Amino acid sequence: TMPLARPTRQIPDAAWTTGIREMTEPWKGALGCLGVAVFFAMTIGIISWPGPGAAAGVAVIAVGGVPAAEPPPPRDRCWHDGGQFCYAWEEDAELRLSLEPSPAPGTECYGVHWTPLRPDVTVKDCFSMANISWYGGGSVRTQRWPLNGAESHAQPFVSGDFSKNPAGYGPVLERYFLGSTGVTVTVAPDVPLFLSLESSRHFCLETPAGRAAEPLRYLLCLSPDVVAAHQHVGSRLAGRARALPDTALLGSPIWHYHGPEGSAAKIKRGLRALAKRLKRHHLEEGVLALGERGTAVLAAADDVPAQRRKRHEVAHAWDAAPLQLSITLSPVPRAVVAAPSQEGFQASNFHPVPQVPLLTTWKGQLCARLNVTSEAALSWFLARARHLRQALGAAYVVFEGAEGNAFLEQAVPPPAELAGDGYTEALAAALATLGNATIISAGARSSHLPLFVQMSPLHSDWSYSGLKGLIPSVLHYSLLGYNFFIPDAVGGSLASDAPADPELYVRWLQIVTFLPVMAFSTPPWLCCDAWVLNLTRQCIKKHQDFVVPLLVKYSEEWLSLGHPIFRPVWWLSPTDPTAFTIEDEFLIGDEVLVAPITEKGQTRRDIYLPGAGHLWMDTSTARVFDGGTVLGNFSASLAEVPVFVK
């Protein structure tokens, strides 16, 4: 039998060498002596290890379960002060378990450290999805909430670009997994990590094959419920020194420029034409967003000495207030960022000449990446960005291409500081020195920085890679601390072959109204009928008057406590299993519930109102409903989005 309690902060004494081989479930006895029965009862997992012949096996960690195969007899290797022990399987692997300091009352944490004892042994821990929902980790192309519905083969757990690797992980990730039973798994940042997701079965952490004895280390914590777990562990991922980006952007819609880019003069005329069109439609406030190519053309014109410029190509700052300008740069030597010398970039170890920079592909071209470990290279790059921002009169600067690990792409061993997502982390820290009007395309251990994060482009359809994946992405970003994100443009920016869908545009517009920033690639007058243009004005006003004050209010809570601003419904119903799988609703703080339509042709939906004992008011009709209930077949016409205030 397994004990239900144990003396606090001490692993009970045990005789490890007697009776182990006679047990039908070796792990059951071992873990029982650890006194963590409650923990493992709530976090059913699978631990497997490859090996020759009888050495291979799988042990299922489950109270009352039977292992699929019996491992070889373990041997106890250490026992220190009742707070740590080691468990070794012959010469295959060693497991070290230790009690760790508690982050808060009611939460207990255990250090898990697997060490292969031979180079041919790979360590792999799998966590079951049976009767438990998991959140966090990495974003995927078809984002789901929880991640139980996601599928991904074992691959390096690093941020990536979906346009280059649709099957990889997305631009925002953290080595943090949250279970609906109140369990968290946090992997050490210096561990070379592979992650696999097997839909509705389990997710697995493993060390890379072919390396010599790579250890797997993580922290397992158990809290009373899922909200307490995140408050005690997940909210502290970025530390306490959090800072806000420029909150003025929250109320400023972004209008992406898609006009002529053949010359600086054409771009300027196109920008002014777009500004006049917006003013004509009474949408004269916001930001005009210039892409990387357009920025490169303006930057090239700025680089031309004044005496050589043509009269119509004279460079001057943007001055079409109240509309502001954003420009786009990337840490690769294109027209915008031309390296003064190759020493500013990483040299690839497989080139015979050490001065040759490490190469990667960027938008179909072969490029070199900025060396973020070189102070000289960073100083040059940041100075260039500051100069262009001032010379072009840009209020905001977007940095694309921050995700990924070019060393992994080229199978080149990275320097220690750039292993995993070290490049993204280092670049984000450097870009934060430009000020809080900076937008970056990726995030890894950087949620505390005063940066906006640009979400990945979505498909212009109703799938999980399109509209249906928007709310799961919102919840994923916010849970990991990235509350100040810029969602993809209304309607999606990855156009399909199908004709424009006004219904999709409207439903998308209704969701982004309640997100940090509203962005548009196709303006409403080009997409839809006049009533959609009028609806766009109404949504922008609601965003500015109703949503932005809420975001500013809850940003203070994020600064002080680290709680997400955009919350899943289980935040108010942490023990209700119904709440764990709802992926088409979200809360703003604790007081506003948004329940949009995400299915084509639908004008009614079921709505879960969280928080038993709370009351919710429908903002359209002022009717009041009880929390902890489901409103069946609730009306939501094309012009409506259900919103409730607690």
Image: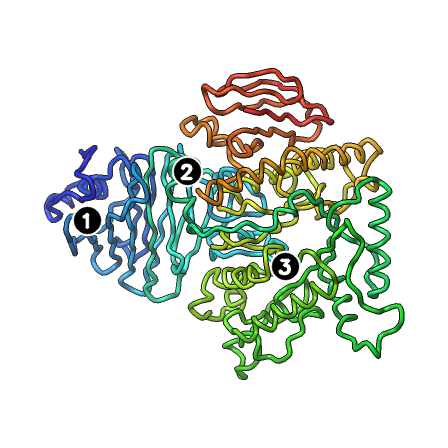
- Residue found 29% across the figure and 59% down from its top: 115
Does the rendering let one see residue 24?
no
* Residue 169 to residue 617: above or below: below
Could you tell which of marks 2 and 3 lies nearer the N-terminus?
2
Horizontal and vertical percent position of residue 589: 52, 34
Q: Secondary structure at mark 2?
A: loop
The one nearer the camera, 462 or 183, is 183
Query: What residue would you read off at disc 2?
Result: 129
- Nearer to us: label 2 or label 3: 3
Q: CA distance from mark 1 to mark 2?
A: 29 Å
Dot 2 crowding, Cα within 10 Å, few <14, some 14–19, many 20+: many
Dot 3 crowding, Cα within 10 Å, few <14, some 14–19, many 20+: some
- Residue found 61% across the figure and 66% down from its top: 331
* Residue 373 to residue 69: above or below: below
Amino acid type of disc 3? Glu
Please state if 29 lies on the left or on the right of 569 as rendered. left
Horizontal and vertical percent position of residue 440: 60, 56
**Residue 622 tag number:** none
Q: Secondary structure at mark 3?
A: loop
Amino acid type of disc 2? Met
Query: What residue would you read off at disc 1?
Result: 83
Number of marks in the rendered image: 3
**Residue 400 tag number:** 3
The one nearer the camera, 267 or 3, is 267
The answer to whether the residues at label 3 and label 1 have Cβ atoms under 8 Å apart is no
- Nearer to us: label 1 or label 2: 1
- Residue found 65% across the figure and 29% down from its top: 597
The one nearer the camera, 442 or 65, is 442
Give the position of the C terminus as an image quadrant.
top right
Horizontal and vertical percent position of residue 576: 43, 26
